[in-house]
Amino acid sequence: MTSDRMEVPVAGRAMSRPSSPDVVVVGAGLAGLYQMHRLRRLGLSYRVFEAGSGIGGTWFWNRYPGARCDVESLQYSYSFSEELEQEWKWTERYPTQPEILRYIEHVAQRYDLHRDVELDTRVTSAVWDGERWAITTDRPETVSARYVIYATGCLSQPREIDIPGLDNFRGNVWSTARWPHDDVDFTGRRVAVIGTGSSGVQLIPVIAQQAAELTVFQRTANYIIPARNAPLSPQAQQEHKANYPTHRRLARESPAGLLGVQGQTSALDATAEERRQAFEQAWSTGGLTALRADYHDLSLDPAANRTVSDFLRDKIRSIVCDPETAEALAPSDHPFGTKRPCLDTGYFQTYNLDHVRLVDLRTTPITTITTHGIQTTDQHIEIDDLVLATGFDAMTGALLAIDIRGRHGLRLADAWADGPTTYLGLQIAGFPNMFTITGPGSPSVLSNMIVSIEQHVDWISDCLTHLNGQVIEASPHAQQRWVAHVAETADQTLMNHANSWYVGANIPGKPRVVMPYVGGVGRYRAICDKVAAAGYEGFVLTPPE
Ligand code: NA7
């Protein structure tokens, strides 16, 4: 493999970078950084491009007040190094965004990763020339790489907001996905938040502490479970770390990459009182896995699902004092788990504060944003600040933002015109030597992302070693079978019963396809391992020309 070098200015210094590296990695979040670490150990030459001005991906951009991971910190961490997992100390059950960014910085320093990340460099196109990828960035350089690995994230392309009149607004507009690095002070201000997904649910109670008036504009009510966040005692941390190998193994074999028992019985076989006790226990424990711990069919059977959905709706009614607000906050149009459930700290309680109110956009939609506020079908609300917590073009958005052209000039946008098609979420037929980390068709967003990231990076790294310069491409037949399997598996669940971003329904015109693989992390890993052990079955390997 070749790697001619050229001088590239990096933060005022000229550094020698290969212009024809073996691999280009796009993105320097948790996936890109670990991939780079593995490539270095394999002795392959590489370039790593990152659009942000810092490393960390999701955790670099989503720095809104209250931003926090909803996977427990001891599980939301790399497992590739025993020393690393033992030495880093988490402070809370769920890590805040600043703490995760500090962790990522620690990892980058420990493994000297910073020096190889080219920041402020956005990949704009990638064209397969029959042997290599010509990768163009917004810097005046095109790099020729044998392989390209997209570590571009599943929730990294903010969705374009389509509310009329936004440009007229004279106050401040803030986006949770592009939050400024300096603190934003809402003290004494009249604030509106649009969006009640995970970002809105985390942000709203924090803004309510500062704002003089807070109005939340809700289109879809969500199922929300208490996080029960708390400081992590040194003793609990030590105990967990003492058993890290077992914990990590169990997470890798589990459905969602998370520790926790998966229920074996049907919710419908339990009595109403038994169910109530089980759900109450989960409610007081907190977290995303607790509610699924007792019954196996909550995400499979509408009647079983109704038992937990009813429980969660009743909880809202018991917390929110105003019955009309409580009813608007109680989800009624989709089963629990078919849109991403959120974890909260004091979300519903926030609506009991005198200066906080909810506008239900289902009954009174926004007609326009005005110079000083928001006009709905029945009132005008004056505001100083508008916060958009309106989500992402999930799973495909970041990839389709790049002009990717594979064999015979095939555009990825055309290949995916009817929805994303992949083999194992790792490769796409027609796009040789191109890998996607946690791509559509893999468990990705339905799992503890870091578990899925490590699995993909390890699989890709082993594959590159095996290839030794050969070309690899998913066979159309294997891809077709995998896409059918992903769809069939999703059809066995309730996943299609909601207009969620899992199915692309939040983006007008996006084809409706259940994008993540719902078959589970453990099962998926076994399939990927089997494919590799069988000599990369379903992929076509050809010697370099
Ligand atoms: P989400 O979960 O996609 O939430 C976006 C929210 O914004 C959701 O409530 C949307 O309502 C709402 N939205 C989007 N566009 C509009 C318009 N035009 N008008 C009113 N409301 C709108 O994104 P998050 O950033 O909160 O969370 C993303 C993921 O990060 C999360 O799932 C975790 O995995 C971590 P809708 O539901 O579409 O009716």
Image (cartoon, rainbow, N blue to C red):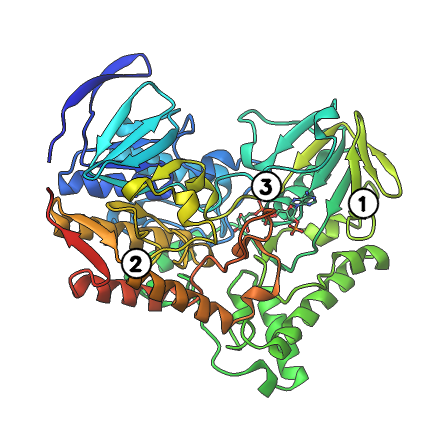
Q: Amino acid at mark 3?
A: Gly
Could you tell whether 462 is left or right of 437 in the image? left
Q: CA distance from mark 1 to mark 3?
A: 19 Å
Instruction: Say if 206 sits above or below 257 in the image.
Output: above
Q: Residues within 10 Å of mark 3 (few under 14, many from 20)?
A: many
> Which label number is shown at residue 357?
1
Q: Residue at x 21, y 63 (%)?
A: 537
Determine whether the beta carbon of the residue marked 3 sits less than 8 angstroms from the nearest atom of ligand 1.
Answer: no
Q: State which quarter of the image contains the C terminus.
A: top left
Q: CA distance from mark 2 to mark 3?
A: 44 Å
Q: CA distance from mark 2 to mark 1?
A: 52 Å
Where does residue 450 sit, x and y in percent of width and height? 38, 51
Could you tell whether 425 is left or right of 530 in the image? right
Where does residue 41 sit, x and y in percent of width and height? 16, 41
Using the rendered image of the protein, determine whether residue 422 is visible from the camera's viewpoint: yes
Q: Secondary structure at mark 2?
A: helix
Circle 3 sits on which residue?
66
Q: Residues within 10 Å of mark 1 (few under 14, many from 20)?
A: some
Q: Amino acid at mark 2?
A: Pro
Circle 2 sits on which residue?
476
Q: Secondary structure at mark 3?
A: loop
Q: Residues within 10 Å of mark 2 (few under 14, many from 20)?
A: some
